[in-house]
Image: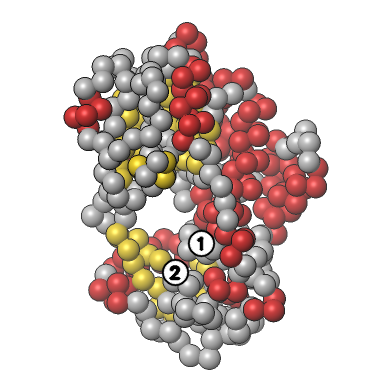
Amino acid sequence: MPAIKLRPEAWACALGAYPDRVFAETLVSAIRHGVLLGVDPACAPPASSSIPPPLPSALEFPETVDKDLENEVRLGRIIDITDSASVIRPLLSPLGSVPKKYSTKRRRIHHLSYPRGASLNDAIPVEYGHLVYDAVLATIDRIRSAGQGCYLYKADLEAAFRHIAIHPSHTRFMGFEWKGRQYLDVFLPFGIRTGPRIYNYFAEAHHWILLSRDEVLRLIQHYLDDWLNVTPALRGVEYARHGRDVFRTIAAELGFSLSSDKEEAGQAVSAACSPFRGSGSWLCQPFGFGGAVWPSGLRSLPSLSYQWGGSLPGAFVISCGPLPHSLVVIAAASPGLPN
């Protein structure tokens, strides 16, 4: 049994009053038995007749692949099938590595769009990868409703996709070869077209559970696996701490683990920024807005500098370049929420 896995009994109990019973029961069943990947049977790629070579980025940084593979095998999320006679011959896709955001480190990738035109991702309808995220203005509205000096709690679920098992009938699509051995990835990977949409079903249910459990989380919002709770300033710091503790407790109950180095609490938090088009400008995606007043009438921002934002006393302090996935730090003038 994998070391990290969602807990179906906890989800079934937490979703006991969920209004859409079919959805709730389907979700719990998916936790127990694994998810299907959305592959069109008519386009399903056959088992590989040859082994695709690793990408140059994997060969250049083999230690990245070695270390990650060792960890994933230890956690039971990847299995070695080299000596297994019972496993159906899999589809093999190459491995590579890419730099981590805001870090000098690298991470392993499974190139599920290879080869172009005949890959696993090509066998999944394009519309299955469509997902509309919460708008930036919704976050702004939440913070404005909470008032100047509100408390923020930001959490990131550690490897959230990798908590979701793949149904055994679809693990055959998830093969790869490394250093003469063949493996199957048996948990939801980051590079598959349907990954964000599949995970978001769990995130929406998780969101409902949080809202139904405690009023302290009534202003919580998520952007895939990133969460932001907003506590009105009038409620006070102890109430904000209570919200943080409730979130942590529920995440553990459901089987999620938190990324402790990305957890922040206070009246200033940092966040990743994705490109959001508005009047030809870059806007910050939902997370990282400090408990301050949004400048009146400001609805689309040019590429901002930290110094520009800092010139607005009591307003958002923003550090954001015009490139995708820039780093954003938003702060209020008030002191933070102690851990």
Where 278 falls versus 317 (above or below)?
below
Q: Position of residue 232 (x, y in %)?
A: 48, 15
Q: Is residue 217 visible?
A: yes
Q: Which secondary structure, mark 2? A: strand
Q: Position of residue 126 (x, y in %)?
A: 58, 65
- Residue shown at 19% from the left, 29% from the top: 307
Discs 1, 2 touching: Cβ within 8 Å: yes
Q: Residue furthest front?
A: 279
Res. 110 mark: 2
Q: Is residue 1 visible?
A: no
Q: Which secondary structure, mark 1? A: loop
Q: Residue furthest top?
A: 234
Look at the image and tell me in which quarter the N terminus lies: bottom right
Q: CA distance from mark 1 to mark 2?
A: 8 Å
Q: Position of residue 302 (x, y in %)?
A: 30, 38
Q: Position of residue 261 (x, y in %)?
A: 35, 39
Image position of 205 (left or right of 176): right
- Residue position for label 1: 189
Q: Residues within 10 Å of mark 1 (few under 14, many from 20)?
A: many
Q: In the rendered structure, which disc, 1 or 2, sits on the residue that comes first in sequence?
A: 2
Q: Residues within 10 Å of mark 2 (few under 14, many from 20)?
A: many
Of 338 and 142, the residue lying toward us: 142
Look at the image and tell me in which quarter the C terminus lies: top left
Where 14 falls versus 98 (above or below)?
above
